[in-house]
């Protein structure tokens, strides 16, 4: 299995705590708390979630590049006593590098990793303890696997992800994740649980906070074509 996380969205502290507790009750052992608004309020919300779920739950604080360098430093100062991983605090690689010396916890790059060169530059500059590889951002599974394999050779931790989707997406990121050396494999999402209409079957149920791949060949997903609606283009052999 690949470990699975779910997201605590930007909300009031009380709402964040309620959602975090509900996700833990569903079996999630890893939570990504969205931050990147007012640093002090973000810190208060993160601290409340940590207190609510206990030390046994892995927490990531993901800013999606929304902090300025000054805001990131304020957030780090306000959360000095908390255990968590900081993800993509600022928009650019240069800005993340600028706050690296103030970050006494693991720092993961997400939006800054688009190409293999981005990974190599981040590693050379000592910025990234881990990276999030989003399949659609790096142009598919093949480039994702290349970046993943080089990250593994460099000792950089890897999360395989996507912007969203259904069963095919979950299967893809689980397969990419399982190809990561276990000591460097972080987590992914069970994206098919985020949608109201799925387009296939084959994924085993989530178990013990993780997602196993489908047992079938290839991606292992049996596509339900009727769920896709009418085709945009119908190509027939001439």
Image: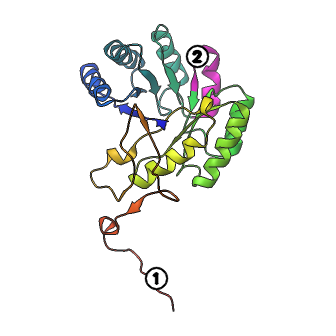
Q: Quick check: 140 left or right of 216?
A: right
Q: Which residue sits at x=45%, y=22%? A: 58
Would residue 104 be counted in the magenta stretch? yes
Q: Which residue sits at x=38%, y=34%? A: 6
Q: Which residue sits at x=41%, y=20%? A: 57
Residue 39: give x, y in percent of width and height. 42, 19
Asked which quadrant contains residue 52, the reply is top left
Which structural element holds mark 1? Answer: loop
> Badge 1: how crowded within 10 Å, few (<14), some, or many (20+)?
few
The label nearer to you, 2 versus 1, is 1
Asked which quadrant contains residue 194, the reply is top left
Which portion, as a residue range, is magenta? 92-107
Residue 151: give x, y in percent of width and height. 68, 37
The residue beneath circle 2 is: 103
Whichever of callouts 2 and 1 sits on the residue coming sooner in the sequence is 2
The residue beneath circle 1 is: 235
């Amino acid at each position: 299995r690949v470990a699975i996380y779910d997201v605590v969205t930007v909300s009031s502290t009380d709402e964040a705590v309620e959602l975090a507790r509900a996700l833990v009750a569903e079996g999630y052992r890893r939570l990504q708390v969205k931050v990147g608004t007012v640093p002090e309020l973000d810190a208060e919300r993160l601290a409340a979630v940590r207190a609510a779920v206990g030390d046994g739950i892995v927490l990531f604080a993901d800013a999606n590049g929304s902090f300025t360098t000054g805001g990131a430093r304020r957030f780090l100062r306000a959360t000095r006593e908390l255990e968590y991983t900081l993800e993509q605090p600022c928009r650019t690689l240069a800005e993340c590098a600028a706050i690296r010396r103030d970050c006494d916890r693991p720092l993961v790059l997400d939006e800054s990793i688009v190409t293999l060169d981005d990974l190599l530059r981040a590693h050379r500059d000592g910025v990234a303890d881990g990276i999030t590889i989003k399949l659609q951002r790096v142009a598919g599974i093949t480039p994702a696997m290349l970046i993943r394999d080089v990250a593994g050779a460099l000792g950089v931790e890897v999360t395989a992800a996507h912007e969203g989707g259904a069963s095919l997406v979950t299967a893809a990121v689980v397969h990419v994740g399982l190809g990561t050396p276990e000591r460097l494999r972080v987590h992914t999402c069970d994206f098919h649980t985020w949608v109201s209409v799925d387009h296939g079957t084959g994924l085993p149920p989530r178990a013990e906070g993780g997602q196993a791949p489908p047992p079938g060949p290839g991606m292992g997903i049996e596509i339900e074509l009727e769920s896709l609606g009418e085709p945009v283009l119908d190509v027939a052999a001439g």
